[in-house]
């Protein structure tokens, strides 16, 4: 019992340290706060802000006011409510993609480094090929054949394309750590490859993993919203991408008064992407304090 | 005997040759992937097209099948593996099939018509943003810590994180619609009607007129990345011993800046050049669709939305092949510029 409490204290202490380090880089900290805000808004917001889908013809493209902070759309519906309700799907796909591609990269990367030989060269050349093929055209062609109905499906296909970067890092890291004393010791104790990978090697490269997790989230957002924008994904739900698609396909882009309807989702997505990127920058500084002075 | 063995060994160690073989292999994988995606997916386009012909034009199954096969340049009665070999053979002869929509138009002639515009706009953008990015990045690396560095760095990091198509839409919305600075409707397409290609001023002006908004979008969305990488690359070069030695030898500041720092700081950026190129060409599907700039990206999007499978397949192949070729070219360029790569193979 005592041990457990001490462990909790230790975790809290390191969290506090991380938080302090995070605050040191102002831009990164702003990114972190905005990220938390967007996550809360998208997951808890829908319970607080109701989304009235009935069209109000008397309120088409109303300018921002107290009642409608971001104005209304072509059917008189509140834009802010649409933004609040439209984030969850985008975020879920991004997170799932990050998770799946990290999983693929870690397992293939460490296997490849440990097994070596022909398997290793096969995996590395596969990674090279996936890196060279332009992703967005491939995705749009695939979307013509596979019905990308649910978020998991989209995330899975996106993850199949975004693992090679991290795989290379994991492989290189495992290759160099493999020869270190503590790994040799673990091997001598006959602890087994999965154990060695998960409890000795991965904790040593957590920084790579976290950062590339977040970066693959950003590329997932890019690809996902791009596919929705071009209308290559069935538009079942209401999200930021669908709003942009509507604005584009229904010609709202060319209508002067619809500017709040177009800019709101663009701003939301850009803000989310920026917060992810700047958060990784400050994470980089936390993991590698020497960077802080240089850049 | 030994001499032959040594020559063979040298050939197999030749970096350029190895890169070349790797590129050919990647192209082969993509070609095979495309074939099997189209034939093995649950919604097989050839079958869909046959059904469509039967229901719409009242053809018999045989007629419809024959027409579909001729459009894809594939004999559907053969076993799949033989169809695959036929597909490869046709591809090798430059036969990519015929468009569904505009019957009789060869996919190759569609590619010939639309690809140059994409290569042009993407190439020009890459050149502009790479050059500007390097200059600005080096400049702020020298002024590190100053307020101009802070401002440019923050702008660059914001620009590099916004998806390029959102930048495109914002340009369209503000410059085209809200402020009406450009005639956005007239800028559609890749060339105004009536303008003949040639070395004339009207032609060149018109080409840039139509390509200007896509180019602007590509430049704005990529320049931030170049600035940031060049800045950090310059900063790390400035700390190198040879720069200090050059300073100690009393060399002129401008000589140190250009021949010592600049040349070495640019090198790592060439590897990002290939990644960036693939990304821009891939993104051209979105950017060209937004501005209705009629390049190969726009063709891909319109063929996907109209389910014109032969066009889709051919255009996807050509986009991939051009990216792979550009990668190869950049690799070769890089190994020319950096002797270390030529000797060690960069591994």
Image (cartoon, coloured by chain):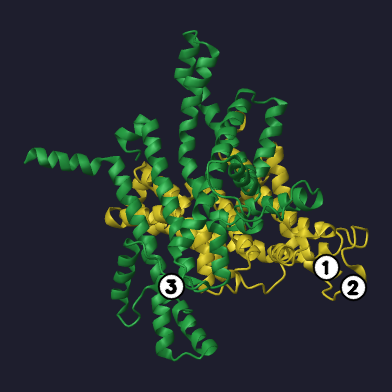
Colour chain A appears in = yellow
Q: 10 Å neighbourhood of mark 3: few (<14), some, or many (≥20)?
A: many
First along the sequence among labels 2 and 1: 2
- Relative placement, left or right, of A195 versus B1 is right
Residue A192 seen by the camera:
no
The circle drawn on residue B38 is 3
Is B153 above or below relative to B98?
above
Q: Circle 1: is it few (<14), some (14-19), or many (20+) Cα within 10 Å?
A: many
Closest to the observer, B125 or B146? B125
**Crowding near the residue tagged with mark 2, few <14, some 14–19, many ≥20 C-alpha atoms within 10 Å:** few
Q: Which residue is drawn at 66% across and 35% down?
A: B153
Whether residues under marks 2 and 1 lie with C-beta atoms below 8 angstroms apart, the answer is no
Residue at 54% in and 62% down? B299
Label 3 SS? helix
Residue ID for mark 2: A57
- x, y percent for residue B65: 41, 84
Please provide percent x and percent y for residue B114: 52, 56
Which chain letter matches label 1? A
Local SS, label 2:
helix
Q: Which residue is at the far left?
A: B1
What hue does chain B carry in this figure? green
- Give me the C-alpha separation between circle 2 and circle 1: 8 Å
Q: Name the residue under label 1.
A: A74
| Relative image position of residue A287 (x, y in whole percent) | 56, 40
């Amino acid at each position: 019992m005592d041990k457990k409490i001490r462990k909790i204290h230790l975790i809290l202490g390191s969290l506090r340290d991380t938080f302090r380090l995070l605050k040191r880089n102002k831009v990164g900290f702003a990114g972190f706060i905005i990220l938390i805000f967007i996550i809360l808004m998208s997951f808890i917001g829908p319970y607080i802000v109701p989304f009235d889908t009935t069209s109000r013809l008397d309120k088409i493209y109303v300018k921002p006011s107290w009642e409608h902070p971001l104005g209304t759309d072509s059917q008189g519906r509140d834009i802010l409510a649409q933004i609040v309700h439209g984030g969850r799907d985008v975020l879920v796909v991004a997170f799932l993609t990050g998770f799946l591609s990290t999983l693929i990269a870690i397992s293939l990367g460490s296997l490849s480094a440990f097994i070596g030989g022909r398997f290793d060269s096969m995996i590395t050349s596969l990674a090279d090929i996936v890196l060279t093929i332009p992703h967005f055209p491939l995705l749009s062609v695939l979307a013509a054949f596979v019905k990308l109905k649910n978020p998991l499906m989209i995330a899975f296909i996106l993850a199949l394309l975004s693992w090679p970067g991290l795989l290379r890092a994991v492989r290189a890291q495992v290759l160099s750590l493999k020869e270190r004393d503590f790994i040799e010791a673990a091997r001598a104790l006959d602890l087994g490859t999965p154990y060695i990978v998960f409890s000795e090697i991965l904790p040593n490269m957590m920084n790579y993993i976290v950062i590339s997790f977040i970066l693959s989230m950003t590329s997932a957002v890019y690809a996902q919203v791009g596919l929705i924008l071009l209308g290559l994904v069935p538009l079942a739900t209401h999200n930021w991408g669908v709003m942009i698609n509507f604005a584009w396909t229904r010609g709202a882009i060319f209508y002067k008064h619809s500017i709040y309807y177009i800019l709101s989702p663009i701003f939301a997505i850009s803000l989310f992407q920026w917060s992810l990127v700047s958060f990784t920058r400050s994470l980089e500084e936390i993991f590698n304090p020497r960077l802080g002075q240089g850049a | 005997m030994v001499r032959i063995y040594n020559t063979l060994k040298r050939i197999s160690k030749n970096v350029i040759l190895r890169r070349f073989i790797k590129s050919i292999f990647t192209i082969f994988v993509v070609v095979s992937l495309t074939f099997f995606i189209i034939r093995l997916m649950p919604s097989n386009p050839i079958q869909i097209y046959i059904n469509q012909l039967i229901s719409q034009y009242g053809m018999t199954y045989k007629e419809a099948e024959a027409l579909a096969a001729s459009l894809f340049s594939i004999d559907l009665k053969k076993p799949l593996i033989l169809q695959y070999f036929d597909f490869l053979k046709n591809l090798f002869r430059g036969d990519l099939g015929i468009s569904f929509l505009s019957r009789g138009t060869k996919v190759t002639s569609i590619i010939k018509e639309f690809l140059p515009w994409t290569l042009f706009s993407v190439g020009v953008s890459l050149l502009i943003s790479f050059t500007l990015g390097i200059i600005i990045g080096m400049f702020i690396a020298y002024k590190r810590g100053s307020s101009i560095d802070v401002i440019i760095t923050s702008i660059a990091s914001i620009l590099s994180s916004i998806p390029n198509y959102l930048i495109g839409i914002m340009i369209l919305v503000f410059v085209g619609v809200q402020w009406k600075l450009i005639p956005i409707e007239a800028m559609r397409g890749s060339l105004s009607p009536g303008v003949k290609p040639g070395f004339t001023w009207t032609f060149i002006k018109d080409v840039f007129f139509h390509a200007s908004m896509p180019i602007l979008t590509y430049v704005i969305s990529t320049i931030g990345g170049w600035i940031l990488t060049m800045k950090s690359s310059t900063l790390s070069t400035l700390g190198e011993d040879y720069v200090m030695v050059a300073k100690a030898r009393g060399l002129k500041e401008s000589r140190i800046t250009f021949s010592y720092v600049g040349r070495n700081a640019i090198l790592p950026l060439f590897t990002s050049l290939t990644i960036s190129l693939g990304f821009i060409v891939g993104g051209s599907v979105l950017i060209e669709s937004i501005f209705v700039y009629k390049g190969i990206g726009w063709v891909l999007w319109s063929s996907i939305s109209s389910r014109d499978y032969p066009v889709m397949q051919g255009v996807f192949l050509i986009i991939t092949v051009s990216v792979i070729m550009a990668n190869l070219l950049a690799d070769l360029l890089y190994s020319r510029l950096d002797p270390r790569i030529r000797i060690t193979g960069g591994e």
